[in-house]
Amino acid sequence: LTGEKGYFDTRIVFVDETGPKDKRVKRLALMDQDGFNLRTLSTGSSLVLTPRFSPTSQQITFTSFEGGNPRVFLMNIDTGKKELVGNFPNMAFAPRFSPDGQRVVMSLGSRDGFANIFELDLRTRETRQLTATPAIDTGPSYSPDGQQIAFESDREGTQQIYVMDLGRGGIQRISRGEGRYSTPVWSPRGDYIAFTKQGGGQFLIGVMKTDGTGERILSTGYHNEGPTWAPNGRVLMFFREGQGANGGPKLFTVDLTGYNERQVPTPAFGSDPAWSPLRA
């Protein structure tokens, strides 16, 4: 009736968290977008973070501390088979697929404590360095056409959001409000970038146009973080950390309008959600 594509035949990959706050066991988990049909994808023997879907195959990429240092892996969610994405000497984290599923963009740490953004071609296994600054550049996210990336950086002193043109190489800061900005995620429609904003003692989930104008806050809370878009670009999911010794993260959805905020049922705590593309 509305002309919008539905998203009810989609799935969410996230980090399932169990146990006391100081000894959390974190497993990769997969469920339907409404919280049903949950299954775990890892044992919890190693810390896992930021799982992200491939737009073209039944794969996810994620960060794992298997072996002690954070490294980026690929996993086939049907078979459970996983493989290391590049044998980099230092930390590798915050991976995300390109729109065509042929590349992964990620942050690679250096011995001096900085981090820059690199792109790995999954076909040739060749890497390309995209940023080179004495700063922490992380959280990269492709535009739907694969021609730009949004990322966060503290190169000007505080966390802010920048956009890079992958063809020409130009970089422009787009966040201009008060506070610190992080976790930028480009809308599947290409019209907005979602983000986490920290300021005034709160963590906010918001959106802005791709040039930084039109900033709108959709949800506020004690600790909101990690937005991910539904495939139709009209709904966001994020996680909210609970306060106190027994608190933990829970998943929520909110419309692009800022209305209809709802908790997504999970059997335990859940963080770092990522929405799948529509099933073929």
Image: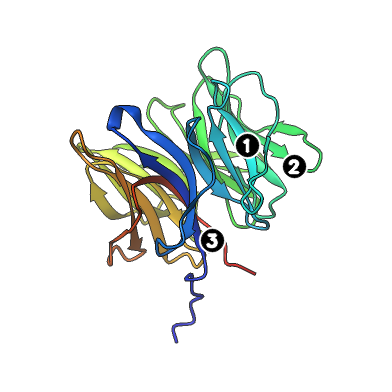
Mark sitting earlier along the chain (2/1): 1
Residue 4 in view (yes/no): yes
Q: Position of residue 149 (x, y in %)?
A: 58, 45
Marks 2 and 3 in Cβ contact (< 8 Å): no
Q: What amino acid is found at the position of numbered circle 2 in the picture?
A: Leu
Residue ranking furthest to the left: 244
Question: Which sits earlier in the primary sequence, circle 2 or circle 3?
Answer: 2
Mark pair 2, 1: CA separation = 12 Å
Name which residue lies at 68% across and 52% down: 101
* Mark 2–mark 1 CB contact (< 8 Å): no
Q: Which residue is mark 3?
A: 188
- The residue carrying mark 1 is 73
Q: Quadrant of residue 125?
A: top right
- SS for tag 3? loop
Q: Which residue is mark 2?
A: 122
Q: Give the crowd class for mark 2: few <14, some 14-19, many >=20 residues within 10 Å.
A: some
| Tag of residue 200 | none
As drawn, which residue projects farthest toward the right?
Answer: 124
Q: Secondary structure at mark 1?
A: strand
Tag nearer the camera, 2 or 1: 1
Is residue 129 depicted above or below 105 in this figure?
above
Q: Nearer the viewer, residue 166 or 37?
A: 37
Give the CA separation, mark 3 to mark 1: 24 Å
Residues at discs 3 and 1 in contact (Cβ within 8 Å) = no
User: Which element type, helix, strand or loop, lies under badge 2?
Assistant: loop
Instruction: Please tell me in which quadrant of the rendered image residue 25 appears.
Output: top left
Instruction: Kindly identify the residue that appears in the image at 51 percent across and 75 percent down.
Output: 5
The three-letter code of the residue at mark 1 reads: Phe
